[in-house]
């Protein structure tokens, strides 16, 4: 079954509504902010010497969706929908963790934002970091494990906002 879509948008109606309520519009593009985040991530070195890789897929995600606080307006399909803050600095201190995930995936991975707890969306406690790989696939990393959200950022946003259950990544 195809998702319910309008002819004027690439997202299902509830996903589109949540994105628009957060300030997104088709054609939104803030490359200046994306470049700031890229420079900040490139300039950060962890105490253990780990560094971020900045990916084209991440810069494009930040330019279009960066800085949005997305609060879903409808109940989830299978799980509670996620409250999102698309700011890669949520993953600033996770260079080693993201590097480890990248090696496990045989790719490179870069942070794009965070899932925030619905009961306290202004806090960092209990959050999951969202990351994108060089091919544009999106993942969530939390205290319970690593999760695959979709082949594209659009797929991942639709899954997170609509409460679609993600796929847990497991070791081979």
Image (tube, grey):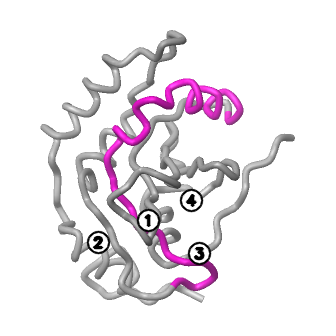
Tell me the number on the disc at residue 19: 2
Residue with the mark numbered 3: 164
Residue with the mark numbered 4: 150
Q: Total marks drawn?
A: 4
Asked whether the residues under the numbered discs 1 and 2 touch, taking CB atoms below 8 Å apart as contact, a structural biologist would say yes
Q: Secondary structure at mark 1?
A: helix
Q: Earlier in the sequence, mark 3 or mark 1?
A: 1
Q: Residues within 10 Å of mark 3 (few under 14, many from 20)?
A: some
Q: Residue visible at 50% across and 10% down?
A: 49
Residue with the mark numbered 1: 157
Q: Residues within 10 Å of mark 2 (few under 14, many from 20)?
A: many
Asked whether the residues under the numbered discs 3 and 2 touch, taking CB atoms below 8 Å apart as contact, a structural biologist would say no
94 lies left or right of 170: left
Q: Earlier in the sequence, mark 1 or mark 2?
A: 2
Report, in whole angstroms, how far the alpha carbon at label 3 lies from the one at label 1.
10 Å
Residue 116 percent location from the top left of the image: 43, 60
Depth order, front residue of 148/118? 118
Above/below status of 16 relative to 134: below
Task: Pick out the residue farthest to the right.
Answer: 172
Q: Which residues are magenta?
A: 76-105
Closer to viewer: mark 3 or mark 4: 3
| Residue 116 in magenta stretch | no
Tell me the number on the disc at residue 117: none
Q: Name the image quarter holding residue 151.
A: bottom right
Q: Earlier in the sequence, mark 4 or mark 1?
A: 4
Q: Main secondary structure of the magenta part?
A: helix
Report, in whole angstroms, how far the alpha carbon at label 3 lies from the one at label 2.
16 Å
């Amino acid at each position: 079954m195809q998702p319910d879509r309008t002819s004027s948008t690439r997202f299902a109606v509830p996903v589109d509504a949540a994105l628009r309520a957060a300030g997104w519009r088709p054609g939104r593009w803030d490359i200046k902010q994306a470049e700031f985040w890229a420079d900040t991530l490139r300039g950060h070195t962890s105490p253990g010497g780990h560094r971020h890789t900045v990916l084209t897929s991440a810069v494009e995600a930040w330019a279009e969706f960066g800085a949005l606080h997305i609060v879903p307006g409808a109940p989830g399909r299978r799980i509670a929908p996620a409250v999102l803050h698309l700011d890669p600095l949520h993953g600033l201190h996770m260079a080693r963790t993201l590097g480890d995930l990248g090696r496990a995936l045989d790719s490179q991975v870069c942070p794009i934002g965070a899932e925030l707890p619905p009961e306290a969306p202004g806090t960092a406690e209990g959050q999951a970091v969202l990351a994108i790989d060089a091919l544009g696939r999106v993942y969530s990393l939390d205290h319970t494990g690593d999760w695959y959200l979709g082949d594209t950022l659009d797929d991942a946003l639709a899954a997170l906002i609509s409460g679609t259950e993600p796929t847990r990544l497991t070791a081979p």
